[in-house]
Image: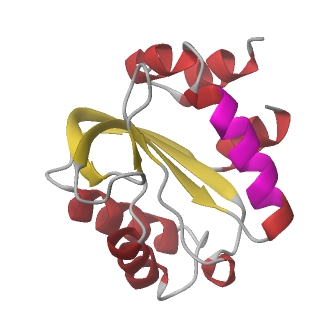
Amino acid sequence: MEEFLELVKKGFFQKKRYDSRQDYLSNTADMLEREGLVKEGFKKVLMDREDNYPTGIQTITVPVSIPHAEFSYVNQESIVVTVFEKPVLFRRMDAPEEEVGAEISFMLLLRDAHSHLTVLQQLSGLLQSDKLARIRETDSMEKLAQILQEE
């Protein structure tokens, strides 16, 4: 969980209301570009990728999404964690014709295949844990980091 936590600390935490998946992806991508974490064009690639390869996941506890784009559009590796004030519909990764009301999104900003694999392994463990329900209730990066550090 160490690499995952470090990337979360380099990124952003937001607890916010979005009207749709497109609203969330567009506004978050714009913020990331303003902050210099991603290159110009990231938003289009991110939104196209989500349309073609949905990232919604129905976990046992809390539905999530894990949007990401090609490595070449990322300037600084990080993870943006968003707790939605109202669930946002994402098409399911395992059944694209169905939607899931994601309550948390982990937007992955990764630059190479090795870190991608490591982060996905650690995220997979998190998605199977009871921490998601606690993350859904958190309201700050400090509280999020504390939850992620726990064994």
- Left/right placement of residue 134 relative to residue 71 reads left
Q: Where 101 falls versus 26 (above or below)?
A: above
- Left/right placement of residue 14 relative to residue 116 reads left
Rendered residue at 67%/17% (across/down): 146
Q: Where 135 falls versus 80 (above or below)?
A: above
Characterize the magenta stretch by its predominant secondary structure: helix
- Quarter assignment of residue 121: top right
Residue 35 lies, in percent from the top left, at: 54, 67
Residue in front for this viewpoint, 110 or 6: 110
Q: Where 73 falls versus 134 (above or below)?
A: below
**Does the stretch in magenta take in 80?**
no
Residue 86 lies, in percent from the top left, at: 19, 34
- Left/right placement of residue 61 relative to residue 39 reads left
Rendered residue at 42%/54% (across/down): 93
- Quarter assignment of residue 77: bottom right
What is the quadrant of the N terminus in the image?
top right
Q: Where 119 falls versus 139 (above or below)?
A: below
Q: Among all residues in the image, which is located at the extreme left?
A: 19
What is the quadrant of the C terminus in the image?
top right
- Quarter assignment of residue 100: top left
Residue 54 lies, in percent from the top left, at: 38, 62
**Does the stretch in magenta take in 123?**
yes
Residue 70 lies, in percent from the top left, at: 61, 78
Rendered residue at 61%/69% (across/down): 37
> Magenta region: which residues?
115-125
